[in-house]
Every structure is written in structure tokens, then in C-alpha cells.
Image: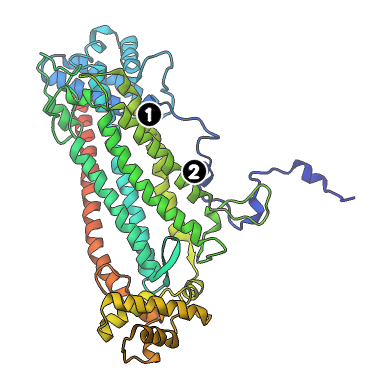
């Protein structure tokens, strides 16, 4: 009988696999991998509270400037809005399920606490249609800018690690089979380039939708003398939306555009994730994931699972479904506002909540993993991975037509396999030449030299190729592009903050 210590009966188990890994999970990783299995989701309208308050303050200032409400009214309204904001920041102002939406909840609070005479004037010249339109534009813009910053951080990580591995030789693959030799740096840099296009998609969203919908009322304008240019400035928009109807009628469109950009980004992350998963398997053993970004098994004691990378793939699939939902929502709307548009906020908020953390997690995984250079180099000595280089050598050095060179090397591969070799042998190549009645004056030493991995990668100097020199040149130009994106993001973030500051400054003058 096995004797057990008494203390074991009270042992606390935080995870069912902790002893396999030498490091505890990175901060926030378990929440990332668990998804919503163990936590509540924040009510959707609760996320709009800061933006509804900002929009309401800007609207109140505009009404006063246009002499539609008094300074006393603004003071009263702003006092109530400040109370809500303070309570929200302390986590005390929560969505009331008995209310219809965040807009009516905030207005009801103001009227209940400060009376109809002043607070009841806040809704002058606006509808919940343009309220939610402006709230969503502000929310989506803030999330888009934050995603842009996180994307740039990940790109910086990828290019930083890539720089250290420009000479780290590895196999490149097509159809999951060894194809040609590349470098770990070349591969990582290619991922950085794809993510840079995702930054451009976010920039394009800003260009398309950073315009003020507030003042469109129910979609068909108002006879009241609203100053929409003023509220545009106070909310950090680039101008006024040209139509009072379009933002309400196409409320699904900004959501879909941003959601699509995030989904393409997630597809790129999913590709990186799958590559890391495969390269970290014992069959490949080129990549070693840090213990802090792996999990174990509740049953199998040996397991070290790449769960965070698999979760990224799962989130990418989930996000794709949300894009389809948004596109479907926008395909058959009658003119003007339709209540189906309310459901457009749910998919995009879900996608942002699920996908944005993946940028940080992927960056931490890339920064912490290790690459086994010896294993990767050995893989470059197998499976005739330098066969294409032999073809190009015959074309370049011995002036053979490409098609003739390729056929002769194909035959040489077959004959070399029969010899038990995984590289093209001189004997096999000569036999192929003989069969094809080709005369090529080459030496065995030359053939072996053009199949050496180190020489192969150095020779690929064409722009975009994997030679260290070629990658270094492209990275230098790429860093200028990233520098431009950083400056743009900072400028737009500052622009939004300046608008908030102007609102606060004007409000201070009322006190």
C-alpha cells in the first residue's frame, strides 16, 4: 500500500498540468486561451459609455454656442455627465437591464437627478440614430488606432528577431514539402511585410470613416441651426459627413470594414501560428517555444502543447464568421434606419475583444522562442532541396536553356535517389546529360559547391530574395515605412486627445 502524506489531501491545484513546464504561464495567457469559458462578457453598450459622454458634452457645447440652451443649462448637463464619468471610472456606473440602451440610460439619469428643465434639453436636435452612429465611430476609431499600435509593436518584434537570423539557414516549403533553401530571417521578414499591409487597411478605415455623423438626427436632418463642423472638431473628426442619411442607413459599413481588416490580420497571424506549431513538433524540431507560452495535458505527463497558437487560429475562424454576419446585415436594408442595424455592434465588438490580444501574445511568443540552427541546417542537406539551384547553375554557368536544364536535373534526381543520395550526384547528372545528348563541361566540385546551403543562400541576391544582403536592403527601406506609420498613428491619437482636451477646456470655462 502506498503511504500518502496528510498534506496532500489539502493540496491546491491551479492547473492540471503544471509540473511538466519549468515556467508558469505568462501573465494573462490563461485568460487568452480560456476565452469566455470562465468569465462574463461586458455588456456591449457599457463599452460605449465614455464615447456617449464625450459626444453629449460636445453636443451640449454646440447647443450653447448656437444659443439653443443657456450657459446654466450646460453647467447642469455637464455636471451630471461628469458624475456619470467619475462613477463609470470607479466601476460603479453599470448598464441597467431595465433600460433600452446606453443613450436613454444616460439621459434618464440626468433628468432624474437634475430635472427636465435643463437636462431635458440635451436631446435637442439629435436622435438615438446619430448618437449610436457617433458612439460607434468614436469606439471603432479608438480600437483601430490601438490595433495599429499593437501591430507596429509586433512588426518591430518580427523585424528585430529577423535581423538576428539573416544567416540562419532553413528549408523553405511548398505543398508542405521541402522546396528551396531560405533563412529564418527571410521568413520572419515576410510575415512583417504582410502585417504592414494590415496597418494600411486600418489607415484606410480612418480615411473612409473619420467623419462626423452627429447632427443627422433621425437621418433626414433638422431645421435647428446645428453647427456640425464644431462637433466634428470637438470629437476629433476630419470633417462632417456629407449626408445626414448615409451614416444611419449604412450603419453596418464602418463595422464591417474594420472587422474585415482585423480578419485579414488574423489570417496572417494564423499562418504564423500554424508554421510555428509545425516547426516546433518533434518531427521538425526547428523551433522551441518558451514554456511560458505552452500548456500541458490533464492526462499525458509528457505534453507541451502550443495552445496559444492554436487559440489564435480558432479566433481567426470565429472572426471570419462575424464578417459574414455583418455583410449579411447590410445586404437588404430599406432606405433610412432599420432596427437590424443594432446587431452590427455585436460582431465587431466580439472580433475586437477576441482578436486584439492576439497581437501582444504573438509578439511575446516570437520574442521568446528559440531556433535550432543545427537541426534546420541538417534539413537543408536532404530531399534534393538544392535541385533548383543546380538548374539555375546550369542555365547561368553553362548556358543551357532553362527547360532543358530542368529536365536533365529531374532525371538526375531519379538516378541519385536510386544511388541512395538526397543530393544530385555527379554520376547521376552525367547519365542524364548522356541520355539527353547534352554536352556540358562541368566538374564534380562545381556541382557539389552549388548545392552547399551556405553558398545557395548567399547567391540569391535578387531583390526580395533570402540572401542576407538582399533582406538587409529591403529591411532598411521597410523600417522607413514603419517609421512613417508610427508618426501617422501618433498624430491621429494626439488629434483625438486634443479634441477631448478642447472639450474639457470649454467646459472648465462654464464652472
* Mark with earlier residue (1, 2): 2
What residue is drawn where x is 34% and y is 91%? Answer: 442
Res 192 seen here: yes
Report the front residue among 129 and 511. 129
User: Residue 361 location in percent, x, y?
Assistant: 44, 50
Vertical side of 249 occupied by 274: above or below: below
Q: Residue 46's image quarter?
A: top left
Report the front residue among 470 and 41. 470
Tell me the colour scheme of the image: rainbow
Is residue 339 rendered to the left or right of residue 63? right
Vertical side of 84 occupied by 424: above or below: below
Q: Quadrant of the C terminus?
A: top left
User: Residue 393 location in percent, x, y?
Assistant: 31, 81
Vertical side of 155 occupied by 456: above or below: below
What residue is drawn where x is 29% and y is 74%? Answer: 403
Is residue 153 rendered to the left or right of residue 336? right
Residue bearing the label numbered 2: 32
Vertical side of 67 occupied by 353: above or below: below
User: Residue 58 location in percent, x, y?
Assistant: 20, 25
The answer for how far apart the CA atoms under marks 1 and 2 are is: 20 Å
Is residue 133 rendered to the left or right of residue 66? right
What residue is drawn where x is 41% and y is 37%? Answer: 353
Where residue 346 is drawn, which disc sits there?
A: 1
Report the front residue among 411 and 367. 411
SS for tag 1?
helix
Furthest toward the right, the residue is 1
Is residue 411 rendered to the left or right of residue 194? right
SS for tag 2?
helix
Amino acid at each position: 500500500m502506498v503511504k500518502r502524506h496528510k498534506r496532500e489531501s489539502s493540496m491546491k491545484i491551479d492547473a492540471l498540468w503544471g509540473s511538466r513546464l519549468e515556467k508558469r504561464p505568462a501573465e494573462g495567457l490563461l485568460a487568452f486561451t480560456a476565452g469566455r469559458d470562465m468569465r462574463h462578457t461586458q455588456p456591449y453598450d457599457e463599452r460605449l459609455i465614455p464615447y456617449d459622454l464625450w459626444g453629449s458634452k460636445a453636443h451640449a457645447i454646440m447647443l450653447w454656442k448656437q444659443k439653443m440652451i443657456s450657459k446654466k443649462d450646460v453647467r447642469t448637463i455637464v455636471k451630471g455627465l461628469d458624475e456619470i464619468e467619475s462613477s463609470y471610472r470607479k466601476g460603479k456606473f453599470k448598464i441597467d437591464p431595465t433600460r433600452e440602451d446606453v443613450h436613454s440610460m444616460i439621459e434618464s439619469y440626468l433628468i432624474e437627478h437634475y430635472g427636465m428643465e435643463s437636462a431635458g434639453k440635451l436631446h435637442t436636435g439629435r436622435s438615438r440614430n446619430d448618437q449610436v452612429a457617433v458612439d460607434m465611430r468614436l469606439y471603432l476609431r479608438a480600437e483601430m488606432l490601438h490595433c495599429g499600435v499593437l501591430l507596429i509593436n509586433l512588426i518591430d518584434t518580427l523585424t528585430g528577431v529577423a535581423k538576428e537570423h539573416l544567416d540562419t539557414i532553413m528549408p523553405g516549403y511548398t505543398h508542405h514539402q521541402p522546396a528551396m533553401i531560405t533563412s529564418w530571417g527571410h521568413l520572419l521578414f515576410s510575415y512583417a511585410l504582410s502585417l504592414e499591409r494590415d496597418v494600411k487597411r486600418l489607415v484606410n478605415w480612418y480615411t473612409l470613416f473619420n467623419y462626423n455623423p452627429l447632427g443627422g438626427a433621425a437621418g433626414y436632418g433638422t431645421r435647428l441651426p446645428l453647427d456640425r463642423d464644431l462637433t466634428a472638431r470637438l470629437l476629433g473628426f476630419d470633417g462632417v459627413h456629407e449626408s445626414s442619411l448615409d451614416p444611419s442607413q449604412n450603419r453596418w459599413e464602418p463595422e464591417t470594414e474594420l472587422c474585415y481588416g482585423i480578419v485579414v490580420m488574423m489570417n496572417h497571424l494564423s499562418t504564423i501560428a500554424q508554421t510555428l506549431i509545425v516547426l516546433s513538433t518533434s518531427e521538425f524540431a526547428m523551433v522551441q517555444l518558451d514554456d511560458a507560452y505552452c500548456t500541458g495535458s490533464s492526462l499525458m505527463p509528457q505534453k507541451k502543447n502550443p495552445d496559444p497558437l492554436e487559440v489564435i487560429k480558432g479566433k481567426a475562424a470565429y472572426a471570419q464568421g462575424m464578417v459574414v454576419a455583418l455583410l449579411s446585415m447590410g445586404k437588404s436594408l430599406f432606405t433610412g434606419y432599420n432596427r437590424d442595424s443594432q446587431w452590427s455592434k455585436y460582431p465587431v465588438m466580439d472580433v475586437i475583444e477576441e482578436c486584439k490580444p492576439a497581437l501582444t501574445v504573438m509578439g511575446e511568443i516570437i520574442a521568446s522562442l528559440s531556433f535550432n540552427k543545427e537541426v534546420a541546417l541538417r534539413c537543408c542537406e536532404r530531399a534534393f532541396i538544392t535541385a533548383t539551384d543546380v538548374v539555375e547553375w546550369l542555365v547561368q554557368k553553362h548556358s543551357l536553356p532553362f527547360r532543358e536544364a530542368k529536365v536533365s536535373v529531374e532525371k538526375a534526381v531519379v538516378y541519385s535517389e536510386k544511388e541512395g543520395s538526397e543530393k544530385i550526384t555527379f554520376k547521376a547528372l552525367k547519365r542524364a546529360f548522356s541520355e539527353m545528348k547534352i554536352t556540358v563541361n562541368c566538374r564534380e566540385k562545381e556541382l557539389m559547391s552549388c548545392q552547399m546551403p551556405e553558398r545557395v543562400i548567399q547567391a540569391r541576391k535578387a531583390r526580395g530574395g533570402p540572401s542576407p544582403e538582399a533582406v538587409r536592403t529591403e529591411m532598411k527601406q521597410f523600417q522607413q515605412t514603419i517609421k512613417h506609420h508610427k508618426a501617422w498613428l501618433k498624430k491621429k491619437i494626439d488629434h483625438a486627445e486634443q479634441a477631448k482636451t478642447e472639450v474639457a477646456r470649454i467646459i472648465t470655462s462654464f464652472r
